Image: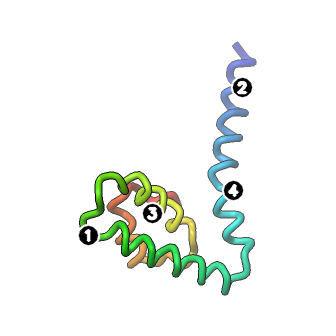
């Protein structure tokens, strides 16, 4: 029984650590390069996902929204636009 608890705790820790990997990578980037990447990705998100996106794009829009939320550059206006594709991650 104890090994089950340890295994579940270890699995939870691994999953938790993996979720923060993308954010840590973004935070390690040069701030100017990160801001440029954010602007490009946000512009793509706006052109593809705002308005009435094709149903085939919904999964991609959700993934883009989740990724954009990881950026410190994603301010209140950004979070408002990406929020229609699911809850925030931070």
| The label number, if any, that marks residue 65 in the structure image | 3
Tag 2 or tag 3, which sits nearer the N-term?
Answer: 2
Q: How many neighbours does mark 4 have within 10 angstroms: few (below 14), some (14-19), or many (20 or more)?
A: few
Q: Nearer the viewer, residue 90 or 81?
A: 81
Name the residue rendered at 67%, 48% in the picture. Answer: 18
Q: Is residue 58 above or below residue 35?
A: above
Query: What's the distance in space between the residues labelled 1 and 2, CA to CA?
Result: 45 Å
Q: Picture coordinates of residue 76 (x, y %)?
A: 41, 77
Q: Quadrant of the N terminus?
A: top right
Label 1 residue SS: loop
Q: Residue furthest bottom?
A: 32
The circle on residue 21 is: 4
User: Marks 4 and 2: which is nearer the front?
Assistant: 4
Label number found at residue 51: 1
Place of residue 40 in the rendered image (x, y in percent of width and height, measured from the top left):
52, 79
Whichever of labels 1 and 4 marks the residue nearer the N terminus, that label is 4
Q: Nearer the viewer, mark 1 or mark 3?
A: 1
* Front residue of this view, candidates 12 and 37: 37
Q: Nearer the viewer, mark 1 or mark 2?
A: 1
> Mark 2 sits on what residue?
7
Q: Element type at marker 2?
A: helix
Q: Nearer the viewer, mark 3 or mark 2?
A: 3
Give the Cα distance between marks 3 and 2: 32 Å
């Amino acid at each position: 029984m104890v090994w089950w608890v340890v295994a579940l705790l270890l699995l939870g820790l691994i999953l938790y650590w993996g979720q923060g990997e993308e954010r840590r990578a973004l935070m390690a980037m040069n701030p100017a390069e990160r801001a440029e990447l954010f602007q490009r990705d946000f512009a793509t998100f706006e052109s593809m996902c705002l308005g009435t996106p094709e149903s085939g794009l919904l999964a991609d829009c959700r993934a883009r929204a989740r990724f954009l939320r990881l950026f410190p550059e994603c301010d209140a206006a950004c979070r408002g636009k990406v929020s229609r594709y699911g809850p925030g991650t931070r």
